[in-house]
Amino acid sequence: MKGYGMFSINNAGWIEKDRPVCGSLDAIVEPMVVAPCSSDTHVLHGGNGEKTNLILGHEAVGKIAEVGNLVKDFKPGDVVVVPCCTPNWLSLNTQGEYTAHDEGLMASFKFLGSKDGTFAEYFHVNQADANLVLLPEKVAPEAAVMTVDMMSTGFHGVENADIGFGDTVVVIGIGPVGLMAVAGAKLKGAGRIIAVGTRPNCVAVAKEYGATDIISYKEGDIVKQVLEMTKDGADSAIIAGGNAESFRQAVDMTKPGGCISNVNFFDLSETLAMPAFSWGLGMADKTIRGGFCPGGALRISKMLQMIENKRVDTTKLITHTFNGFDKIEDAFKLMDEKPRDLIKPVVFI
Ligand code: NDP
Ligand code: ZN
């Protein structure tokens, strides 16, 4: 079968591989709608270390082609939403709080992490009954594909930010992940949401999702801007973009007792550092958390329920659509180039 991926770092193209084999608890899925992601381009450029001969992609809605003999809830032909993180639910770590790290750091991210991704004629999903969700009738597949990483990750940033009613929350970065964090912060009751970003489409959607203020990192120090707007700082800051410096800035712009929540991928080569003053000489009671996209069927069915009941419209993220399997390459290249009018592309296969 054919798939779009990477031969080696910075060397992408179409790869020929054998169709994956279905284990007894697993499913083989044919993609119907896929979306490229910043994380795919990150992997291509070596952000996760050396990877070779790997099919990319990890966001998909698809049709089941085959199920293992122990799968109870799904059959060939079912249209399913595929979480980007598909934990091994039999692992001990998964029985704890953080299902994203089943057999080690981010190990539940199996597409790209330990096997081929979803930009293929067929892809493999482990433990189908625990990881797949039937596409709800009232949810469009393109809306659903935005839940599997963008919404689950952005909302996880919100969950880790410990937001209370009326809180002031800064969202650093308003690409698709940060935009979902803005939407989630509003749903959690934030009183003021200060969004950091410059792309006009993103700024417009941030306002629609509930941002009350927009600031630009290109127009001066964002810490200074937040402190001027809030007097003593924000209750929480969610990092969903930027660079290693954004970490220090998030700590600096948060008031004592506040919470810093990161969902941004930092590069292997980066060091996260801050002056002791930023953390109140260690006395500021500031909580610092970083988290990875929760997956699995329960999580994603909850995200889908929010769409079904019109709590959030994820299709606002979609700025570019492509039609046809072969167009995965164009969509991926667009994601890699990131023109200023792009938020998220989708490919209907
Ligand atoms: P985008 O590249 O689309 O958006 C990045 C945002 O950060 C933009 O709003 C950009 O502003 C802003 N930005 C850029 N530089 C700075 C800066 N110096 N200071 C402040 N803001 C800045 O990214 P995505 O939304 O696709 O992804 C965001 C991050 O989340 C990535 O690192 C991605 O790899 C990661 N990610 C993490 C996951 C997880 O589970 N933890 C899952 C998926 C993604 P502008 O408007 O000017 O472009
Ligand atoms: Zn993704």
Image (tube, grey):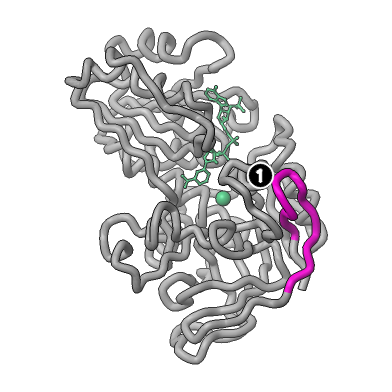
Give the quadrant of the C terminus: bottom right
Residue numbers of the magenta segment: 4-17
Q: Where residue 260 sits in the image (x, y, percent)?
A: 33, 31
Q: In this view, does 256 lie above or below 133?
A: above
Depth order, front residue of 272/294: 272
Q: According to the image, label 1 marks what residue?
A: 41
Left or right of 236, for residue 40? right
Q: Please tell me whether the stretch drawn in magenta is mainly helix, strand or loop.
A: strand
Q: Where residue 269 sits in the image (x, y, percent)?
A: 53, 33
Q: Where residue 96 sits in the image (x, y, percent)?
A: 26, 60
Q: Which residue is depicted at the point 75% across and 59% down?
A: 4
Q: Which residue is depicted at the point 44% across and 78% down?
A: 129
Depth order, front residue of 53/261: 53
Q: How many labels does the image show?
A: 1
Left or right of 285, for residue 186? right
Quarter of the displayed picture in which ligand 1 can be seen: top right
Residue farthest toward the front in the current orientation of the protein: 50
Q: Can residue 146 be seen in this view?
A: yes
Q: Which residue is depicted at the point 64% across and 31% down?
A: 201
Give the quadrant of the N terminus: bottom right
Label 1 crowd (10 A; few <14 / some 14-19 / many >=20): many
Q: Does the magenta stretch include residue 14?
A: yes
Residue 139 figure quarter: bottom right
Element at label 1:
helix
Q: Can residue 309 be seen in this view?
A: no
Q: Is residue 8 above or below residue 157?
A: below
Q: Which residue is depicted at the point 47% across and 48% down?
A: 312
Residue 283 figure quarter: top left
Q: Is residue 23 magenta?
A: no
